[in-house]
Image: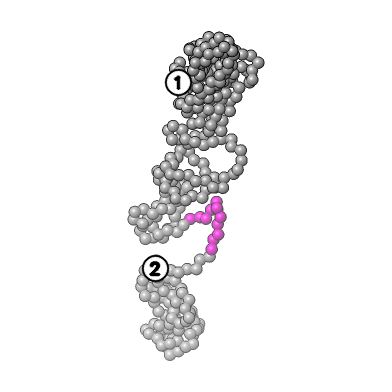
Amino acid sequence: MSNFGNSGCGCGGCGCAVCQPANVIFQNPGGCPDPGSVTTGAHLAVYDPNFCARRVLDAEGFIVANATPNGYQISATTQPNVNLSNFSVTSGNTIGSLLVRNSDGIIRTLLATGANLILMTNASGQFVLQPIPTPSVPDPLAVTTANIGTLTVGNETITGGLKFTGLVVGAVANTIGLDAAGNVVIGSPSATGVQTAMFYESASSPGAGTPNGSATPGSFLIIGNQLYDSGAGLLGVTNSTTLKVLVAGKYTLNFCAQVAYTSGGTGTPAINLVINGVIVNSGNARDGITSTTDRTAFIAGFQAMDLGVNDTVQLQLSANAGSHTHVYEARIVAQKFA
């Protein structure tokens, strides 16, 4: 090579022709002297495909080597494309630290100093480490369609309709309804729907005794024996002639008795339904019975009304029933339908 002696160790001193062969520059038996070192360089020396010394154009960024059809190309870039290996983790694994570009433009290792922190962005688009925010649910929460397996709810207000499908068929142990304030409450079948209680003059029906056989006009009849209750406990017994309402609601009251006149009796028999001391129904009163022989009249009636807790219920033989009157089979049936 003609200019080997003038170019020092290699081609490119004061300009050089194409080096042929390329490895001739490494055949200096004396070796190359140490060029020295610096902490900051102005230029990066490289060799072109012909092994001629060149310098990379000044530019900011990373020095990368990219494979091209003509070999590797060394250049500066601010967008390095590096094929990294994969690092697989599962829940609970420690993965170390993250590399981030700080606000001053320098890439640093991000070291979190607390637990349960997440990365979020601020108004400037920068990442901020902060505690996991407490989730908030809009009130009211508008849901069009929800497919839920198991749902536990505290206090909710429902203004629309409810539709249930796929319910299990079985015996009803509890019922769901609304109270006076519109709250959904759980009740029992015995306390909802149509409930019934029946009271009679004797402890069994038909009874062997005739406790009202000697009733006098205007007296209250004995009805203080409960023969049946559907389970709601609608009415209780205050005494032998007085019942007391235990569950408020809308009721129908059905009452009846047999009125018999012995020979010589006369009058207008009626069985009065008395609520809180006031006659509200006299049933099918039988006018003007006169008897030269024994006669029997069936007296009955029914009343629909609202009853409150502690209201009293009584049956009374009418005051104008007349003499020689005898009452048998007195009973009352209370049905609560709402």
User: Can you tell which quarter of the image residue 38 is in?
Assistant: bottom left
Structural distance between the alpha carbons of marks 1 and 2 = 99 Å
Counting from the top left corner in percent of width and height, residue 279 is at 45, 18
- Identify which residue is drawn at 47% across, 35% down: 178
Q: Was residue 94 drawn as part of the magenta stretch in this picture?
A: yes
Residue extending farthest to the right is 208
Q: Is residue 225 above or below residue 81?
A: above
Label number found at residue 78: 2
| 330, 196: nearer the viewer | 330
Counting from the top left corner in percent of width and height, residue 44 is at 40, 73
Determine whether label 1 and label 2 are within 8 Å by CB: no
| Residue on which disc 1 sits | 280
Indicate the secondary structure of the residue bearing disc 2: loop
Q: Quadrant of the N terminus?
A: bottom left
Tag nearer the camera, 1 or 2: 1
Counting from the top left corner in percent of width and height, residue 111 is at 45, 52
- Identify which residue is drawn at 50% across, 27% down: 252
